[in-house]
Image: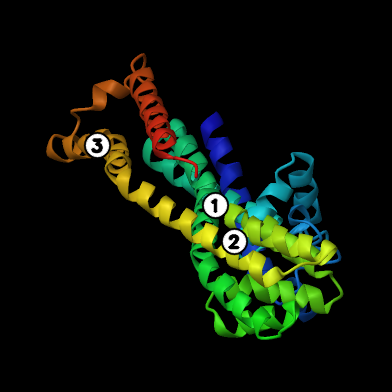
Amino acid sequence: MAFTLLFSMLLALGVVVFFLAFRHIWGARDPVDGRLKQYGVTGEMPAETTSDAGMSPKTWPVTTRLLNGFGVGPRLAADLMRADVSLTAAEFALLSLGIGLAGFLAGGLLGGFLVGMGLGLLLTMAPVMLVRSKGRRRAQQLTDQLPEVLTLLVGALRAGYGLPQALMMLVEQLPAPVSVELGRVMRAISLGTPVPRAMTQMADRIGSDDLDLMVTAISIQHELGGNLAQTLDSISSTVRERIFLKREIRSLTAQQRLTGYILAALPLLMAVGFSILSPGYLRPLFEPGLRVLPATALALQIVGFLVISKIVDIEV
């Protein structure tokens, strides 16, 4: 009876959240807000730091206050901006919650309350993990483009271009994602943001050590003067060597990373295979009193995968 009542309440809540999120995300938007987001501003809050990005007080104010109260909002907004996802933190949180509720309802119907809870939690965290994975891939793509960026930037500076004009040339000639990020920098500069500050905001969004080298050199040159082209030329050589070393390390650790993936997936694949070939073979493991065994095994599998990932994650 209690499960039926809880299930009905969550079903109603899930339907309401889904339709509200659908109406708000795909409904009519203020065109001014859309233009401001392209300039790094959301709602009425200036995006001077990545922690403010995507935290618009005009949209879903209650959800935004809750996220800020738990300290999740700024970090989630920074992840969304880093991955170039055009949603606010509140919108993304509600969307993840709706997906999690749908998973709970589906799991509850198919396997009971515990299965529903597990599936719901998994589907709630899945969008967050996907956004962070996309942000890491995008940051890696931008890092791989840095040697070309520095080469063109040095050439433009030696040809007599000023730094803003050289950056605009990069925006016009280079592909995404570096052109998108430099476009944001140029729009911030056109609104009156100093060049070092705009570049620092870009580095904070991306979170790349190689990009930090370039931004630091530009900031120091802006404050103290000096030959920026020569400095960036030296940084370009350093960045190329770092990228080459990272790729070499990744190729040398490919077998160990593949081993981690196989060891993590093998028990699950075997369980699925046994269930298909011999239905009911694994059912005794899920009887009352023995459910702790598969739960413990799953936890140890996750710990082992994380340990292997940490071992092969060599910092350069």
Mark seen at residue 235: 2
Residue 291: image quadrant is top left
Tell me where residue 178 appears, x and y as whole percent: 58, 71
Residue 266: mark = 3
Sooner in the amino-acid sequence: mark 1 or mark 2 = 1
Q: What distance separates the C-alpha of mark 1 from that of mark 2?
A: 28 Å
First in sequence: mark 3 or mark 1? 1
Q: Nearer the viewer, residue 42 or 179?
A: 179
Of marks 3 and 1, the one in the foreground: 1
**Image location of residue 141, percent across then percent down:** 49, 64
Determine the residue positioned at 54% across, 66% down. Answer: 146
Give neighbour class at mark 2: few <14, some 14-19, many 20+ (Cα, 10 Å): some
Q: Cα distance, mark 2 to mark 3?
A: 44 Å
Kindly tell me whether residue 232 is visible in this rendering.
yes
User: Residue sitting at 51 percent across and 48 percent down?
Assistant: 129
Instruction: State the mark number for residue 132.
Output: 1
Q: Amino acid at mark 3?
A: Leu
- Residue at the limit of the structure toward the top, as seen here: 289
**Observer able to see residue 88:** no
Q: Nearer the viewer, residue 189 or 110?
A: 189
Label 1: state its secondary structure: helix
State the residue at coordinates (62%, 74%).
Answer: 180
Q: Amino acid at mark 1?
A: Arg
Q: Is residue 159 left or right of residue 124?
A: right
- Is 289 left, or right, of 35 in this rendering? left
Colouring chosen for the image of the structure = rainbow
